Amino acid sequence: MDKKKEVGQMYYIKADAFFYADEVKPAGYLAIDKGLFGDWSESVPIDAELLDYSVYVIAPGLVDTHIHGFAGQDVMDNSAEGLKIMSKELLSTGVTSFLPTTLTSSFEALKEVSATIASVKGQEEGAKIQGIYFEGPYFTEEFKGAQNPAYMKNPSLEEFASWQKAAQGLIKKIALAPEREGVADFVSHMTKEGVVVALGHSNATYEEAQRAVQSGASVWVHAYNGMRGLTHREPGMVGAVYHLPNTYAELICDGHHVSPVACDILLQQKGSDYVALITDCMAAGGQPDGDYMLGEFPVEVANGTARLKEGGNLAGSILQLKDAVKNVLDWGLADLSQAVKMASYIPAKSLGLENTCGQIKAGLPADFIILDKEAHLLATFLNGQKVWEKH
């Protein structure tokens, strides 16, 4: 039978397992009703319309909360068409929700990009824009990574208010360095406004990071990368990531940014409920090797990495979130359901979006993926409709 279902139809999916946020449901049936998740059951009516994915697993669509570009498109290109292409192409990576992520740039450029993203929300045909992530510009030069230090400065509530107005309230997360002046006040205001503050690209001490967390910061930008490391006398940013409870660590599991052993240590320190898999992907994701741009910087993509042409720093990644899930499984760091949860429910929850996306739950949009037991992606569904299939 044709496996494509039109939104509005009631049907059931048969599968070997269903990955819920708090449990794995065994073999059975999941109702999809008018594009929304219904309930799981052991049996269905005789005349029920059925999609048979026996021997496969049904998982929530993946949620990428830190992604700069994909399929040749860069968020900083400030192109509505580019964002729509990115949204559509992300379906092939299992991603059904994402936060277009900006880079450190000028006040005006960031304002314009914010307005463009806001204009696209609701018009996208693929993965859904669930907010905007400002990665910068309130960083410090010592750990600038592939960000432009010319635009780095202290946080300003007035400046942020202009960006948020242009974004029509869409900015959900902003990253900064804890050692910047005025951080405690800024973080406290952001948290009251419902904007999540992430900490990274920073040379902060443990105490400086701790103060920012006490003010309300709750996420660590790509753990290990772009931050002061741990030593026995100064635990630094990495020590704070390990030690401060109820904070979420972003993690890039591409095998280049962080070694599998370091990923394992992070998981042992924080537990999988506080690690959010991200890609930090740039425009070259899903594209052949060659020369690309990340914001204003020329980048060379080869051997699975994206590096700045000048200096050779890693410049984001070309990782796809489905592959991060597979790597976590293949490296023996977690089972498949935990790996999926770290790429769906946990990133959504880290932003307070868990009742919008990132989980199978009755009443939520039926955004889900079909996986085999080895974490290979077979199909992606949006609002109960199949929108991508592996050929």
Image (tube, rainbow, N blue to C red):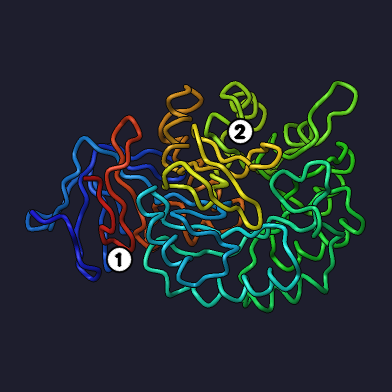
Q: Name the residue: 56% across, 74% down.
A: 116
Rendered view: 133 above or below 371: below
Give x and y (percent) for residue 133: 63, 59
Instruction: Give the mark toward the camera: 2 or 1.
Output: 2
Q: Which residue is mark 2?
A: 257
In front here: 223 or 368?
223
Amino acid type shown at disc 1: Gly
Look at 57% across and 54% down and name the residue there: 68
Q: Which residue is mark 1?
A: 35
Horizontal arrangement in the rendering, residue 57 relative to residue 62 (left or right) = left
- Image x and y of residue 227, in percent: 76, 38
Which type of secondary structure does the marked residue at label 2 adopt?
loop
Question: Who comes first in sequence, dot 2 or dot 1?
Answer: 1
Q: Label 1 crowding class (10 Å Cα cut-off): few <14, some 14-19, many 20+?
A: many
Separation of disc 2 and disc 1 at Cα? 38 Å
Q: Residues within 10 Å of mark 2 (few under 14, many from 20)?
A: some
